[in-house]
Image (tube, helix red, strand yellow):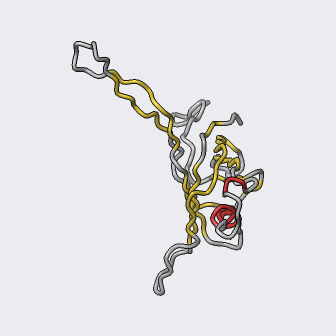
Amino acid sequence: MATRFQEAERNDPFRNFNFRIVIDGDEVAACRKMSMLEVSVNTVKFRAGNNRTTVEEMLPGRVEYKPVVFESGLTNDETFEAWARQLMDQDAQAEPRAAEPNFRREVEIRVLDIDNITVVRKYVLHRAWPSKYTAMSDLVGDGNDTIIETLELTHQGFERIPV
């Protein structure tokens, strides 16, 4: 018999601290933070010249995906830096950055259950590429924090993948 505080089916929200980042099939060093996946649809204001009211019509415009920022403790894993350098160290070469092979990648975000094993949500950033890289955070002589590297990815959309 179920007690008063037991539920037949639990439906707790997922926690935001169990996640993994996978780039082209390889899991990268654990990130401590990832910004929100955000998309917006621009509003186009429209008013026909023969419209007798002063009210503008609103139409959906272009879709805009916000960049995603990953923060990770600085370790010997060079995944973020190597990818950023692939685009940012092009000054000495004649080819344009877009000619660099595989500069756009698929990035998978796996949200894990409280057991830190079971994947409960999966999202993929499509055709992502590094638009900003910070090699390390501030160094503070009397500090007590870890050194953080950040990678900002611009992408052409995301989708939720069934698990």
| Residue 40 in sight here | yes
| Residue 112 shows in this picture | no
Image vertical order of residue 75 relative to residue 160, above or below: below
Query: For the point 73% across and 57% down, which residue is it?
Result: 100
Is 4 in front, or is 96? 96
Q: Quadrant of the C terminus?
A: top right
Q: Residue at x 50, y 35 (%)?
A: 63
Is residue 41 toward the left or the right of residue 160 in the image? left
Residue occupying image coordinates x 70% and y 66%: 93
From the top left corner, tell me how far across and down residue 89 is, in percent: 66, 68
72, 117: nearer the viewer: 72
Q: Position of residue 109 (x, y in %)?
A: 65, 48
Q: In the rendering, at what x and y percent does residue 152 appear?
A: 56, 57
In the displayed structure, 96 sits above or below 7; it is below
Residue found at the very far front of the displayed protein? 94
Q: Which residue is found at the position 68% from the left and 36% from the top?
A: 161
Whether 150 is drawn above or below 9: the answer is below
| 59 sits to left or right of 51 | right
**Considering depth in this image, is 3 or 85 the residue closer to the camera?**
85
Vertical order, 91 against 105 (above or below): below
Point out the image quarter for the N terminus.
Answer: top right
